[in-house]
Image (cartoon, rainbow, N blue to C red):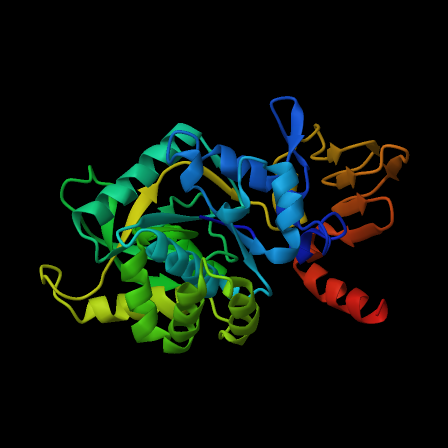
Amino acid sequence: MIMAGGAGTRLWPMSRQDRPKQLVPFIRRHGRASSLLEIAAERLEGLVPPERRYICTNEAYRASIRAALPRFSDAQILGEPVGRDTVNAVGFAAAVLQKLDPGALFAVLTADHLIEPADLFRDRMEQGFELVEQDPTRLVTFSIKPTHPATGFGYVERGASIPGTGGLGFRVERFVEKPSREKAQAYIESGAFGWNSGMFVWKASAFLDCLRRYKPESHAGLMKIASAWGTKDQKRVVDEVYPTLPKISVDYAVMEPATREQARTPPGARDGVKVCTVLMDLTWLDVGSWPSFATTLDPDAQGNRVSGKGIAFRCKDTLVVNADDRHTVALLGCEGLTVVHTEDATLVMPSDRAEELKLLHAELAEKLK
């Protein structure tokens, strides 16, 4: 299941309410522009059959996704009437899949990432499936080998290795949310931490059992949706119940309390939740902001990166993104600047203030009401 419901406010003005970042074709690959969701779907080739692939997204994006990815039928798109954060997106999929197949195991993937090489990604995902097939109580997450002390990512601390995984599977000791630079540097130097990728594998029933224990309000609502799924009341119940679910991430709602429970359980015990991680030593890029998008472009000798009809003349470390081929964006003598132009909006900001774009987006929404 690919989660594709984010608004992408840090990629405004390219990402909009009617066409969020996961549907914007702004990643150049193989001589053509692709969207993040298209790329995420392509990564599933050879991993699971087409009929077993699902997308969880905002119901408002259904038509756009069907047009962009026609291989996904209506039944394979789980439409949220409103976003209620990741624990409910995952729980929604788990509830539906368990009703369709009580023994279902499923992977939770995202539409935000560029991951290379794809064959290594699929190999590591297969390892995750194998861990859950061996023990259906396991909750498997995937941690990325860090390349720098990032402060915008969560971290996973690895514990004892799991026999038979070739040094790739580990017991999880703890999750750490967005540390300071000093702590992030210490984590990297320790060699025991990876970036939290937001990708998982588990049995649908095992995840729902954790939800029942750790977030019973969400579990109760999702069970109502599951009961109505496939009946004439399906849409009515989803529209009534889903907006009432508590908004919280899957890490806070399930993974962290499960890890705390595990810490109270001896490693060899047969009962208790088993939170595991598979280490992914590959290239992983979270394309959630303009600085991260910039790294997908080749720089010139002065570090300037240009996408679309534009030029950065006598500039240094600038990003120019132009989605309007009838318009030219030209920068002269600028340094450390990001300029993004679309048909109806233009963004100009210092690149090192990209995290404030969410605040600007909120201000714009208020002023344009």
| Residue positioned 38% across, 71% down in the render | 219
| Residue positioned 41% across, 62% down in the render | 91
**Nearest the camera: 363 or 334?**
363
For the question of whether residue 178 can be seen, the reply is no
Q: Position of residue 215 (x, y in %)?
A: 37, 74
| Residue positioned 28% across, 55% down in the render | 102
| Residue positioned 37% across, 36% down in the render | 48
**Nearest the camera: 196 or 150?**
196
For the question of whether residue 219 can be seen, the reply is yes
Is residue 244 shown above or below 139?
A: below
Q: Position of residue 18 (x, y in %)?
A: 73, 53
Is residue 291 shown above or below 25?
A: below
Q: Quadrant of residue 262?
A: bottom left
**Nearest the camera: 317 or 224?**
224
Residue extending farthest top = 31
Q: Is residue 129 left or right of residue 45?
A: left
**Nearest the camera: 281 or 215?**
215
Q: Is residue 154 left or right of residue 139?
A: right
Q: Quadrant of residue 124?
A: top left
Pick the quarter of the image with the C terminus: bottom right
Q: Position of residue 60 (x, y in %)?
A: 66, 56
